[in-house]
Image (cartoon, rainbow, N blue to C red):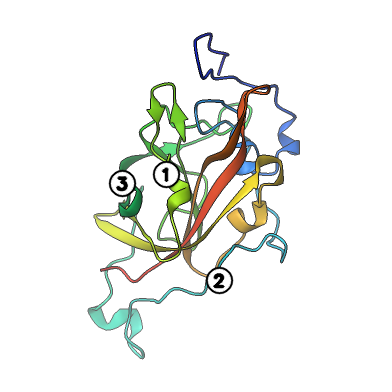
């Protein structure tokens, strides 16, 4: 991302420390001013600690089957498979295709090319599989609000749905967290979970005009609900 020379908000790529100094994808998520999602390294997260625990409990989600019935006795929908293709968040008006996010040769995450489209980190768990699936989206662009502009409005109990394998997988928001990007809660975002969960990430907080990037990350935590 080269610096853009233009009026108002400008995009800027700061010099990055070595990959080993970036603890995870979200650690420097907001390096790009006016883009809402910057580039950052990914890597195996450390195990969760009490200090980094999510803001709400994330217990084992229901299996969808009836007690004593192996495989749900035909009542459970088929296990999701394939690549997630779409995300919907009714409260904040998000209904977006999902692009798969990968890494460049420097092991930096390549953010969505389209500011109005969210992405799924394809080297992590997929939504509906055990573990925390990470979705990321831009906060804004030179034209105005981007796909995750209202992410910080989500509250516990709100619904997030992900399309995968021909079915909509529902998730329930359990809480959210806003932290400085240099204090990103790596273990809470990437640590193992007892069942399928989601992490939705964008930028937030104040815009540092001197350094030309947002100072915070917004992370929303959600757990799987029984498929409808």
Front residue of this view, candidates 13 and 65: 13
In the image, residue 65 lies at what x, y percent? 33, 80
**Residue indicated by mark 2:** 57
Q: Is residue 82 visible?
A: no
Q: Residue furthest bottom?
A: 68
Q: Under tag 1, what secondary structure?
A: loop
In the image, residue 169 lies at what x, y percent? 32, 60
Q: CA distance from mark 1 to mark 2?
A: 23 Å
**Residue indicated by mark 3:** 93
Between disc 2 and disc 3, the foreground one is 3
Q: Residue at x 36, y 89 (%)?
A: 67
The answer to whether the residue labelled 3 contacts the one labelled 1, judged by CB atoms less than 8 Å apart, is: yes
24 over 66 or under it: above or below: above
Image quarter hosting the N terminus = top right
Point out the tag, 2 or 3, that comes first from the N-terminus.
2
In the figure, residue 73 lies in which quadrant?
bottom left
Q: Under tag 2, what secondary structure?
A: loop
Image quarter hosting the C terminus = bottom left
Q: Residue at x 40, y 27 (%)?
A: 144
In the image, residue 226 lies at what x, y percent? 34, 71
Front residue of this view, candidates 219 and 108: 219
Q: Residue at x 59, y 19 (%)?
A: 12
Q: Under tag 3, what secondary structure?
A: loop
Front residue of this view, candidates 163 and 171: 171
Point out the tag, 3 or 1, that comes first from the N-terminus.
3
Residue 223, label in figure = none
**Residue indicated by mark 1:** 150
Front residue of this view, candidates 42 and 171: 171
């Amino acid at each position: 991302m080269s610096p853009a020379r233009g009026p108002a908000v400008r995009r800027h790529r700061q010099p990055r420390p070595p990959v080993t100094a970036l603890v995870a994808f979200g650690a420097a998520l907001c390096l790009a001013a006016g883009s809402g999602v910057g580039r950052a390294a990914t890597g195996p997260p450390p195990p969760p600690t009490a200090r980094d625990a999510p803001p709400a409990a994330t217990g084992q989600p229901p299996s969808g089957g009836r007690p004593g019935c192996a495989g749900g006795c035909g009542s459970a929908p088929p296990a999701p498979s394939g690549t997630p293709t779409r995300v919907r968040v009714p409260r904040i008006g998000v209904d977006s295709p999902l692009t798969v996010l990968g890494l460049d040769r420097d092991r930096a995450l390549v953010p969505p090319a389209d500011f109005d489209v969210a992405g799924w980190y394809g080297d992590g768990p997929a939504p509906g599989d055990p573990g925390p699936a990470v979705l990321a989206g831009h906060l804004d662009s030179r034209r105005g609000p981007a796909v995750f502009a209202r992410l910080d409005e989500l509250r516990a109990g709100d619904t997030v749905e992900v399309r995968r394998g021909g079915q909509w997988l529902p998730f329930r928001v359990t809480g959210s967290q806003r932290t400085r990007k240099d204090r990103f809660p790596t273990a809470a975002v990437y640590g193992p979970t007892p069942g399928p969960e989601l992490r939705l990430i964008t930028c937030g907080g104040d815009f540092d005009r001197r350094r030309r990037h947002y100072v915070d990350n917004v992370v929303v935590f959600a757990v799987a609900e029984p498929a409808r």
